[in-house]
Image (tube, coloured by chain):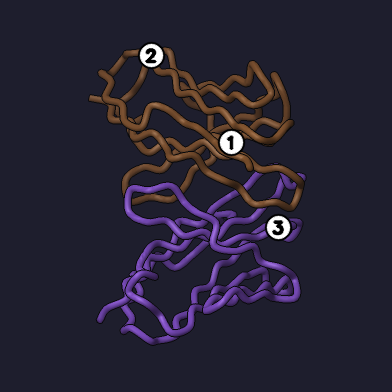
Amino acid sequence: RKEVEQDPGPFNVPEGATVAFNCTYSNSASQSFFWYRQDCRKEPKLLMSVYSSGNEDGRFTAQLNRASQYISLLIRDSKLSDSATYLCAATWGGYQKVTFGTGTKLQVIP
Amino acid sequence: SQTIHQWPATLVQPVGSPLSLECTVEGTSNPNLYWYRQAAGRGLQLLFYSVGIGQISSEVPQNLSASRPQDRQFILSSKKLLLSDSGFYLCAWRGTDNSPLHFGNGTRLTVT
């Protein structure tokens, strides 16, 4: 079983739609979680960290469910510029290792 | 502020040739350093990470190696490249235990 798993998509959504991605992790000892955005042929850039109580940054909301071992990312009012691949990441192995999911591709269409 | 430099941006190398990719971090001390590889259309594969000078942890047994000769310098090497070594190589750093990774711009390696 992969340490971090994501639905690869693609998710094709119209502008203004709300879209949600889930990411499951296998190691219950994982401590920190993050969402990254990766544009084509570019390096991943941090979108937001995921806190136990959930957190929001503008149109983006991240949630953590430790009981079910998944994290989620909700994007409201999708913009064309949100089109990218979204990667989730989890730390484990004494918090030194950081493992990524394979990414979920989002395409926002006009 | 902290910055991470990675070079070169692109590289085309023949099979069997050596490789050396360098990464340096500025504006922080004793960072955790990482090398990832992303094959075309695939996810990020953790190759090596380091929590201090001379301390290297290898995640995937292969013909690559890593070294950390200085606190903020991380080098990825190979003595003989394989076609399967082609990919997008990313160096990253992080600070405190719960802090996120920050990536360099990456090196796109094509082995021919």
Residue B34: image tag = 1
Q: Residues within 10 Å of mark 3 (few under 14, many from 20)?
A: many
Please give the letter of the chain rendered in brown: B
Q: Residues within 10 Å of mark 2 (few under 14, many from 20)?
A: some
Q: Residue at x 32, y 54 (%)?
A: A40
Position of A75 relative to B18 (above/below): below
Relative placement, left or right, of A42 versus A91 is: left
Quarter of the view holding residue A52: bottom right
Quadrant assignment for the C terminus of chain B: top left
Q: Residues within 10 Å of mark 1 (few under 14, many from 20)?
A: many
Q: Are the residues flagged by discs 1 and 3 in contact, CB closer than 8 Å?
A: no
Q: Are the residues flagged by discs 1 and 2 in contact, CB closer than 8 Å?
A: no
SS category of the residue bearing label 2: loop
Residue situated in front as seen by the camera: A9 or A60? A60
Tell me where residue B13 appears, x and y as whole percent. 28, 20
Residue situated in front as seen by the camera: B107 or B56? B107
Tell me where residue B15 appears, x and y as whole percent. 28, 18
Chain designation of label 2: B
Measure the alpha-carbon separation of dots 1 and 2: 20 Å
Residue annotated with mark 2 = B18
Residue annotated with mark 3 = A32
Please give the letter of the chain rendered in purple: A
Q: Label 1 amino acid?
A: Tyr
Chain designation of label 3: A
Residue B84, visible in the rendered structure: no
Q: Residue at x 57, y 46 (%)?
A: B102
Which residue, as the protein is rendered here, is positioned at the far left? Answer: B112
Looking at the picture, do discs 3 and 2 lie on one chain?
no
Quarter of the view holding residue B27: top right
SS category of the residue bearing label 3: loop
Position of A5 relative to B78 (above/below): below
